[in-house]
Image: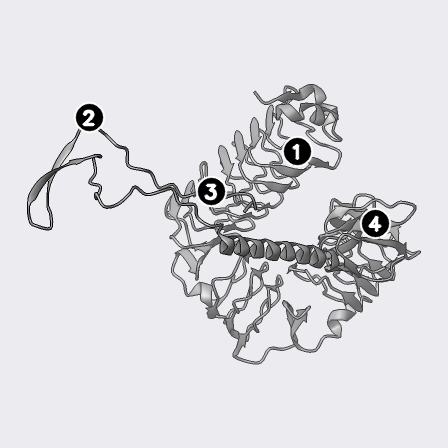
Amino acid sequence: MNKNSKQKIAVSKNKISNNKPLVKKINNKNNKKVAVKSTSKSTIPTNKSPKRIVKKKKPVKAILIVSIIFVLLAGISVSYLVWNYNREFTVSLTDISGIEYSGYDNTTIKNGNNFCFTIDIDEGLVEYPELLAVKANGVTLEADNGIYTVAICADTKIEVFGYGTPGLFIDNTTIIAGVNNELIIIPYGITNIGYNSFDGLNLITTVVIPDTVTKIEDVAFYNCTNLTDITFSNNLYTVGFSVLYGTKWLNNQPNGIVYINDNIVYSYKGTMPANSNIFFREGIISICGMAFMQQEQLFGIHLPESLKYIGEGAFIGCINLQTIDVKNSIQYIGRNVFYATLWLNNHADGLVYLNNWLYSYKGTLSTVSLTIQDGVIGIAGNAFNSLTGLTSVEIPASVKYICTYAFYNCNISTISLPENLEYIGESAFYKTSLTTITIPSKVKTIELQAFGRCTNLVSVNIISNIDILPHEIFTECSNLESITFTGDVNKINSNAFYNCTKLNSITINSSTPPTIIGSNFLSNTSANLHIYVPTQSLATYKSYSGWSAFSDKIFAIS
């Protein structure tokens, strides 16, 4: 409150009115009635004088309280500024094989200060330009005379991408072919070690797999007979079948369940005891493909809440397996996981359910349409594979996952994908009779060839935000005319539309042009192709790498 301000309370005087006298009877002390003229509309006692305007004293107490509050707030503000200035953050230098950090004294840095460092690369490593970057919390840094500088205002993670063993063949972030060296260092930034990529390379003794790798595909290190030491990614999630078959690493493991990183079940080694009933420990996240293939002594399995992924054919041929205790946490069931088991044989023909999953259709199809029961969250791999008589499936809103080859080679012409759908697996709708498809907004991942060879497909609308439009997703959809990206798309594989000869309209609502992976983008599409992009981004698309070759085909969205 301002020191010069005063609070005044006005007590209004009664206005005197002479033109409208009021007569009121009152009793005097002698109980005589007399007439008294009132000087106001209200009654004013004759023995009292009118009230005066009273000036209150300054509210000293209120001023004092406000002053104290102001001082306290000022003190808190100063204290916060001092605290914030002296706040310390930690810089984490990611441990990457072949990379050393130097040029710094401390990794605990005060708020607002700079952290400077340099990197040293082992002589045996080379740069892979498609991955190469130095990043702080995901933001790329540029070196000044070899020195990287980052202003610290939060805990900061430093990563060095793209240095590894020479001679590796890389497609995007996948290794597609290896090299026969004694030591293999996979570059940081690789996410996938591809199918058969190191098969039979018998000079390899040591492999270092960085934490960016989440997937190792089938037979990746198959028959690498001298492979002894493997550093696995801490973020590894899925491992295919026979990845480490024939290696010294596997030979050196004790009999029983073989683990990777203690949380991935790789296989069962040795002879399983009769009438085995396995209680898998809590904490495992995935079971590899073919892990328990043809274990005839396996009678029951009890899967923990932590389990998310069951690989292709994990329990295939376990002819005595009849008890399967599975929780509601599963997010992926591959092809033929329980094929030729007693559990499956004991089910009647028709739709077979495994807890909250649709596992498969068993027997000869007796109808052209099917309805999946409410509450199902996933459709397992191969669930309807090659049921050519199937023309219609009603999928409930609860379904989140449609796995590998689920509707492969079915004659489904229309299908409504549920709004809660998050995942569409490899070749899930390959060679179906779909004419149009809308991919809903919650879909996070679409695998390669998901809609390949859908020769009746005419139009596609992708509402969801897609990171990567994968390899050959619409390959040989020979009647596909239009595709609309209602959501954002960050990357498009160059052969996503391979042999879509009638494709004449692509509408992209992303303001930033998607990165094109590869060199054959839009080959074998219609000569009359039009690409529609946001008006404000038209010039950017026309000059952007991978898009500039089609500048005469790029137009603003009306």
Residue 509 in percent (x, y) is at 59, 31
The mark lying in front, picked from 4 and 1, is 4
For the point 56% across and 61% down, which residue is it? 308
Q: Residue 149 carries which label?
A: 4
* Dot 2 amino acid type: Asn
Q: Earlier in the sequence, mark 1 or mark 3?
A: 3
On the image, which quarter does residue 229 sit in?
Answer: bottom right
Looking at the rendered structure, which numbered label has been put on residue 498? 1
Q: Where is residue 424 in the image (x, y as percent from the top left)?
A: 55, 46
> How much space separates mark 1 and mark 3, taking CA atoms?
24 Å
Task: Determine whether the residue tagged by mark 1 lies in a helix, strand or loop.
Answer: loop
46 sits left or right of 156 in the view:
left
Q: How far apart are marks 4 and 2 (CA)?
A: 90 Å
Q: Disc 3 on helix, strand or loop?
A: loop
Mark 4 burial class by Cα count in 10 Å: few <14, some 14-19, many 20+:
some
Q: Do the residues labelled 3 and 4 touch (CB within 8 Å)?
A: no
Q: Mark 2 points at which residue?
A: 19
Disc 4 and disc 1: Cα gap in Å?
44 Å
Mark 2 and mark 1: span between their CA atoms?
A: 102 Å
**Residue 371: horizontal and vertical position, in percent?**
38, 48
Looking at the picture, which amino acid does disc 3 mark? Answer: Leu
Question: Badge 1 local density, few (<14 within 10 Å), some, or many (20+)?
Answer: many
Say which label, 4 or 1, has the lower sequence index: 4
- Inter-mark Cα distance, 2 to 3: 87 Å
Q: Nearest to the eye among marks 2 and 3: give it.
A: 2
Quadrant of the image for the C terminus? Answer: top right
Q: Which residue lies furthest to the left in this view?
A: 32
